[in-house]
Amino acid sequence: MVEFLPSSKAVVTTSANKSALANVSIAELGEKQVAIRTISSGVSTGTDKWVISGRFEWGNFAFPLVPGYQRSGIVEAIGSSVSHVKVGQQVFATASANYSDATAGWGAHTSYGICEDFEVFDATGIPPERSAFGVVAQVGFNAASRIIANPGDPVLVIGDGVIGASGALCAKARGFKPLLLGRHDSRLTKIHSLGIATANSNTVTQKELSDFAPIAVIDTVQSPEAFELYYRALPATWAAETFGNSRTGIGQIIFSGHTPDGANTWADMAHLQKQELTVHFVSGWVAHRIVQTLELMKSGGLSLEKIATAYPASEADIEKLFANIAAGKSPDVAAYINWA
């Protein structure tokens, strides 16, 4: 018979877009599992929104559920077969195990939770409010890692959320020159404070984008409207070969993130073919990229906590945070819940 520990505080979504702070029961620790006391859990205003609305298509998340897929904390107990982390160690974790009274909609927005050992990574020496963004930062890392260009080449990033900011920071860490476009001046000001050039997509001109001459675009918005904004600024292979354009290689678009509701048109195929653009699709996380992302965080290249808003784990703050997420009106570049 499975035993359950005293209840833990967690964000619980009881039905579509109805989330609040509540108690959940934690199962007994398994031999290949790790028990973690959460310090911070990073919010993804995109993916968390789709999960709490019941519109995330990669899984069968039944209500009630605990959302969230990234958190930092301290190891409190380990199973008998766990050897890569120890009690008292600071770690980053992704998905939690299911609760007795709620589905783990990855289950990271919790004050205490059980994780499978392969979901847990060393985060020693990284501020917890920074490592709490390990997954979304890894999505940006993944996007920037796909760029085929030379150091100093310009890269355009579309979107002023945490994935756009992460992609721009990772592109900068690789030696490229990023320009991030967004629609919210308050967010752009914060991202600019990290040394990233920014511009408002509502006022930027086509000439300014063409003069910037990006070799690649990281598109975190993923819509026909976003594509219309930037595709003309990308180099066409035939033009480079015919006219001796100094920018060699093929212009790239990296679509980064998740799009729900069966959306299947992000770009005009005729223009992709005409310009011979290379297209990448990135979204999920894998272990080795998370390790690399955490290493970049440790070195200071991904200080996302500097542009993030902290929310206490109180009933009023949780309701406000997730009501904004559900409505698509979050004012934050990034946000995290302070469980400590």
Image (tube, helix red, strand yellow):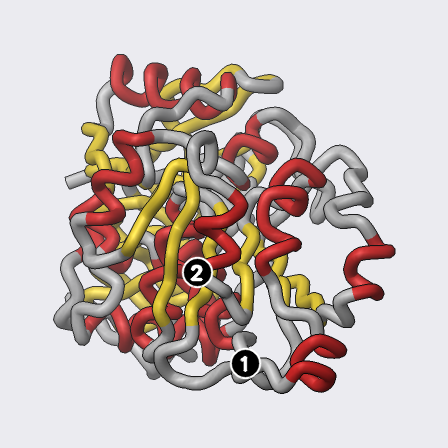
Indicate the secondary structure of the residue bearing disc 2: helix
The disc labelled 1 sits on which kind of residue?
Arg
Residue occupying image coordinates x 49% and y 61%? 139
Mark 1, residue position? 247
Residue occupying image coordinates x 22% and y 35%? 309
Indicate the secondary structure of the residue bearing disc 1: loop
Q: Give the Cα distance between marks 1 and 2.
A: 12 Å
Question: Alpha-carbon neighbours of circle 1 within 10 Å: few (<14), some, or many (≥20)?
Answer: some
Left or right? Give the position of 268 relative to 170: right
Q: 122 above or below 105?
A: below
User: Splitting the image into 4 quarters, where does residue 320 fall?
Assistant: top left
Residue projecting furthest to the front: 243
Res 73 seen here: no
Q: Position of residue 49 (x, y in %)?
A: 53, 31
Q: Position of residue 27 (x, y in %)?
A: 45, 47
Residue occupying image coordinates x 22% and y 41%? 190
The disc labelled 2 sits on which kind of residue?
Phe
Q: Nearer the viewer, residue 312 or 289?
A: 289
- Which is nearer the N-term, disc 1 or disc 2? 2
Left or right? Give the position of 271 relative to 111: right
The numbered dot on residue 75 is none
Q: 327 above or below 110?
A: above
Q: Position of residue 153 (x, y in %)?
A: 42, 76
Mark 2, residue position? 212
Tell me the quadrant of the picture where the C terminus can be found: top left
Left or right? Give the position of 303 relative to 237: left
Q: Position of residue 115 (x, y in %)?
A: 43, 58
Residue occupying image coordinates x 18% and y 75%? 299
Res 100 seen here: yes
Q: Nearer the viewer, residue 288 or 35?
A: 288
Q: How many marks?
A: 2
